[in-house]
Amino acid sequence: MYDLIIIGAGPAGLTAALYALRAGKKVLVLEEKAYGGQIINAQKVKNYPGIIEVSGKDWAMTLFQQVKNFGGETKLEKVVSLKVDGSEKIIMTDMDEEYQTKTVVISTGTRYRKLGLPKEDELVGKGISYCATCDGNFYQDKDVAVVGGGNTALMDAIYLSGIAKKVYLIHRRDEFRGEKIYVDEARRKENVEILLNTVVTGLNGVDKLESIGISGDREIKLDGMFVAVGNQPHNQIFQDVIELDDVGYIKTNDGVHTNINGVYVAGDTRAKDLRQLTTAISDGAIAATMAVQEMDNS
Ligand code: NAP
């Protein structure tokens, strides 16, 4: 039996692991895809207090190494169910493994939101991407678009302007949601054309993306389109056990406690106002500390 099982090895989950390990607990971290979470796709993190600039991947891999140095057990297995049997929690994974634990931290993060256009799924990897850092290099001297108006879209457009010939930055409103510092930088790039009050209405191409339709019945020829329209939770596997809000984020009563004793939530997957690296690691530290206190007091 583990003291704590953490579901999701992003910044929140790895921080929770670090805190629980340092308190001498037996910890297992289960991760579906890749250790580090979405931050590994961030070219540069410039708003982490005390660090002027760091690559998201370097930062996350250092944290992962820290967890390993403290003896953290980590497994790449997808959690398929969580059952609560009194004070014992049972976690099943897609490897047909079953793990028992006293406490759980859910830190499953979020997934990329799609535009929901016809052909969007079939053109993924054939011109459509949700990660500029991962796929940007395929578009040397090509024409690309970035869709979205948040920090991710702005940073993607800035990043791609150094690779692609032309970058259209397409946003549905007349002002950006992202920070002014990035808006100003994107505006300064000569090969970035900003299209405000504009939505993508259609995707054209058979084996690969060739053009997109946009507001005003216009068509733009493109080699690639990067969708950066935010994220969505993916907590369906917990919905019969854990209380979710209308959108699917995990509700808490006072920060990190879910409606089930011994099950905590940390990071972007919990209902909250600000989803940042700093708030994710803060959640992780608090959730693990609460879990440790609960175990020590029982
Ligand atoms: P976000 O801030 O939620 O922005 C999503 C953008 O996509 C918004 O501009 C939104 O438009 C637009 N959008 C949503 N659904 C759309 C649709 N169906 N069609 C067209 N446009 C749509 O997401 P994000 O940029 O990924 O950022 C997520 C979080 O990470 C934020 O808190 C952000 O600050 C943070 N972040 C921080 C940094 C950093 O270095 N500081 C870098 C990246 C991300 P509206 O504006 O009209 O709603």
Image: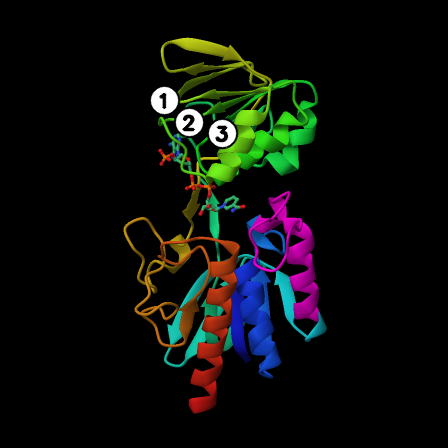
Identify the residue under disc 2: 171
Identify which residue is drawn at 44% across, 40% down. 230
How far apart, in angstroms, are the residues tagged by discs 3 and 1?
25 Å
Tag 2 and tag 1, C-beta contact below 8 Å: yes
Above or below 53: residue 69: below
The response on whether ligand 1 sits within 8 Å of label 2 is yes
Above or below 282: residue 143: above
Question: What amino acid is labelled 3 in the image?
Answer: Asp
Q: Is residue 50 left or right of residue 241?
A: right
Question: What amino acid is labelled 1 in the image?
Answer: Asn
The residue mark sitting in front, 3 or 2, is: 2
Identify the residue under disc 3: 121
Q: Quadrant of the N terminus?
A: bottom right
Could you tell me if residue 71 is visible in this image? yes
How far apart, in angstroms, are the residues tagged by discs 3 and 2?
21 Å
Question: What amino acid is labelled 2 in the image?
Answer: His
Identify the residue under disc 1: 197
Q: Position of residue 82 (x, y in %)?
A: 43, 65
Q: Quadrant of ligand 1?
A: top left
Q: Residue furthest bottom?
A: 297
Near-viewer residue (179 or 237): 179
